[in-house]
Image: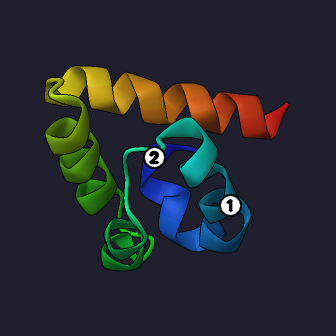
Amino acid sequence: MNIEEINLHWTEFSPYISSKWPRLTGLDRETIQGKPERLMDLIQVRYNINRAEAERSIQALIEQIDR
């Protein structure tokens, strides 16, 4: 899976969000709705990191899930 495929695998991916990014609220998770751009935007805001760091963080979780 890659970042663009998050929406296709949302039911598999979404349970990991709370443990990986605990600062994301329930409303944040509802707002994401499988959209990788929304996930990146919210990670950037909640963790005060740049887009590249947010993307790397998401990719690291995807790789962990794929193992």
Q: Which of marks 2 and 1 is nearer the N terminus?
A: 2
Kindly identify which residue carries mark 1. Answer: 15
Q: Where is residue 31 in the image (x, y as percent from the top left)?
A: 30, 76
At horizontal 25% and vertical 61% (from top left) the residue drawn is: 38
The quadrant of the picture occupied by the C terminus is top right
For label 1, the SS is: helix
Residue 38 appearing in the image: yes
Amino acid on which disc 1 is placed: Pro
Q: Which of 39 and 29 is in front in this view?
A: 29
**What is the basis of the colouring in this image?**
rainbow
At horizontal 73% and vertical 63% (from top left) the residue drawn is: 12
Q: Is residue 35 left or right of residue 62?
A: left
At horizontal 56% and vertical 37% (from top left) the residue drawn is: 20
Q: Which mark is on residue 63?
A: none
C-alpha distance separating marks 2 and 1? 16 Å
Q: In this view, does 39 lie to the left or right of 6?
A: left
Give the tally of numbered discs. 2
Instruction: Classify 22 as above or below 28.
Output: above
| Mark 1 burial class by Cα count in 10 Å: few <14, some 14-19, many 20+ | few
At horizontal 37% and vertical 53% (from top left) the residue drawn is: 24
Q: Quadrant of residue 62?
A: top right
Kindly identify which residue carries mark 2. Answer: 3
Residue 1 appearing in the image: no
Q: In which quarter of the image is residue 55?
A: top left
For label 2, the SS is: helix
Q: Where is residue 50 in the image (x, y as percent from the top left)?
A: 14, 24
Amino acid on which disc 2 is placed: Ile
| Mark 2 burial class by Cα count in 10 Å: few <14, some 14-19, many 20+ | some
Q: Where is residue 59 in the image (x, y as percent from the top left)?
A: 50, 31
